[in-house]
Image (cartoon, rainbow, N blue to C red):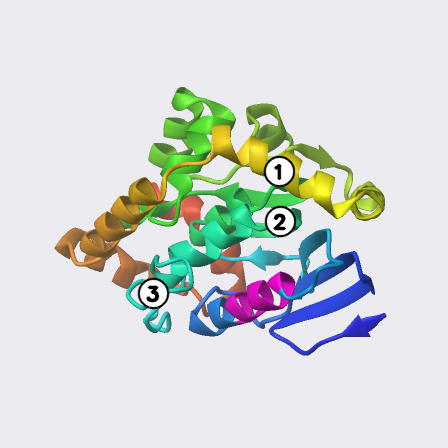
Amino acid sequence: MAESAAPLRVIEETPAYWRIVFDYPPFNVPDAIIFQGLQDLLARMDASPSLRVVVFESANPEFYLSHFDLTGKTGNITTAVGPSGLPILTDTFVRLTRSPVASIARIRGCVRGGSSEFVLACDMRFASRENTLLGQPEVGVGVHPGGGGTERLPHLVGRGRALEIVLGADDFDGDTAERYGYVNRSFPDAELDGFVDALARRIASFDRRAIVAAKNLVNQVSLPSADRLLDALNSFQTALTWPEAQQRIQALLERGLQREVDFEKSWPALLGALLDT
């Protein structure tokens, strides 16, 4: 079993099955470093003809991937162009979805905003029943999703529930996420690892050509267009400049976002009263 270094550790269970472990203390906040790690991973996946399936998980049971970095450490991920011709943020998610390799998110902990959009870009999502907080809180921060949440969620959960998730800007537990279709299934925490590992090993045992063909056919009828994803990202970048968004982001940072563990766990619940004095 081969293993690489943080912040994304690649554990090669077999040549056909890899586990990718997010290990970026304290909160696994996706910033420019995480996205560079994902870009490097995608290149490595493309160069591995024996690979059939990857499982994304977290070394921190409280934070799978927390949310888009709001302190300005995202570098050029919304402006520099990746191999697909799209900005790196969008490019990362699109290439993961279009990859011939099947991708599974094994979710424990908080997964919000851009991190929710990452797991939506994975082919399958399985969550801990007791230990999952999943959501798109951007509207409560004064902006809107920009990494594919508004494009992917309606296909999974339907229009009404997508609007509930996006406009309500709150957390969803594992059971509710399963009922809505936000995740494939939720499991008691003690059963999650065994199920996902068994599924990944089963997929890894199948012929790569069949996996690639089947995934490609599903992609043709289920994926948003690159133009729609690009429009959403451009609109999100504009929204970040709105004065009301800047006010809400500053209020969150002052209260402890990305600094205080307790606040980082619970902040979407406070968005409705964020600017109350």
Tell me the element at label 2: loop
Give the percent coordinates (x, y) of residue 46.
61, 62
Q: Earlier in the sequence, mark 1 or mark 2?
A: 2
Could you say where residue 261 lies in the image, as x and y percent from the top left? 53, 64
Depth check, front residue: 141 or 267: 141
160 relative position to 95: left or right: left
Q: Residues within 10 Å of mark 2 (few under 14, many from 20)?
A: many
Horizontal relation, residue 243 to residue 104: left or right: left
Q: Which mark is residue 81?
A: 3
User: Marks 2 and 3: in contact by CB < 8 Å?
Assistant: no
Q: Earlier in the sequence, mark 3 or mark 1?
A: 3
Q: Earlier in the sequence, mark 3 or mark 2?
A: 3
The outermost residue toward the bottom is 5
Amino acid type, residue under disc 3 in the picture: Val
Magenta: main secondary structure equals helix
Instruction: Name the residue that disc number 1 marks.
Output: 215
**Figure label count:** 3
Q: Nearer the viewer, residue 126 or 13?
A: 13
Residue 100: mark in rendering: 2
Stretch of the chain drawn in magenta: 37-46
User: Which residue occupies 49% across, 40% down?
Assistant: 171
Label 3: how many residues lie within 10 Å, few (<14), some (14-19) or many (20+)?
some
Disc sitting over residue 266 in the figure = none
Task: Reply above or below: 219 against 192.
Answer: above
The residue that appears at 60% across and 42% down in the rendered structure is 123
- Secondary element under disc 3, as helix, strand or loop, is loop
Distance (Cα) linking label 1 and label 2: 7 Å
> In the picture, which quadrant includes the N terminus?
bottom right
